[in-house]
Image (tube, rainbow, N blue to C red):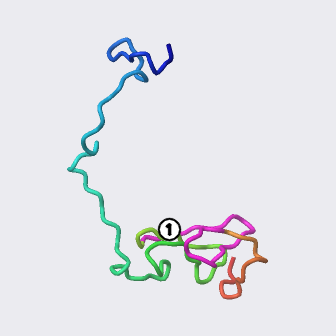
């Protein structure tokens, strides 16, 4: 006989891998759970650190400093020593070598 032909037993003394549980009929968290709504882009008021609610944005003075913005809340971050923030796109968090990035407007390190 093959494994597929064996009847699996349920109950004490049988490994849980052989127990077949009924499918869940509702969300395990339940209806009482409240999930906070994310800020809509039309509600967001830009700040110096976060011109958009979400993304990665360079510091205006320091080339190796940048801000990670999530729902309009910024977290200050620094690139590793010898690296500078690559500000080509706000959707990518990337530090790069200084000779690859123009830091003339953000000359502090």
Q: Of 6 and 58, which appears nearest the observer?
A: 6
Residue 4, horizontal then vertical, whole percent:
46, 21
For residue 26, side relative to residue 13 (left or right): left
Would residue 42 be found to the left or right of residue 26 on screen? right
Q: In the figure, is residue 83 to the left or right of 19?
A: right
At horizontal 40% and vertical 22% (from top left) the residue drawn is: 16
Residue 51: where, in percent of width, then height?
Answer: 47, 81
Q: Residue at x 34, y 72 (%)?
A: 39
Give the residue pinned by disc 1. 75
Q: In the picture shown, does residue 36 fall above or below 25?
A: below
Quarter of image, res 106: bottom right
Which residue is at a point 25% across and 43% down the rendered structure image?
26
In x, y percent, where is residue 109? 69, 76
Magenta span covers which residues? 73-94
Measuring from the top left, give residue 52's x and y in whole percent.
46, 79
| Majority secondary structure in the magenta region | loop
Tell whether position 74 is magenta: yes
The question of residue 78 being in magenta is answered with yes
Check disc 1 and report its element: helix, strand or loop: strand
């Amino acid at each position: 006989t093959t494994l597929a032909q064996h009847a699996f037993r349920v109950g004490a003394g049988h490994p849980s891998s052989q127990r077949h549980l009924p499918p869940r009929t509702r969300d395990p968290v339940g209806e009482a759970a409240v999930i906070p709504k994310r800020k809509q882009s039309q509600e967001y008021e830009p700040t110096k650190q976060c011109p958009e609610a979400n993304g990665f944005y360079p510091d205006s003075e320091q080339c190796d400093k940048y801000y990670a913005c999530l729902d309009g809340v910024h977290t200050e971050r620094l690139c590793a020593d010898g690296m500078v923030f690559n500000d080509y796109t706000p959707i990518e968090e990337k530090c790069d070598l200084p000779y690859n990035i123009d830091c003339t407007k953000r000359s502090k390190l």
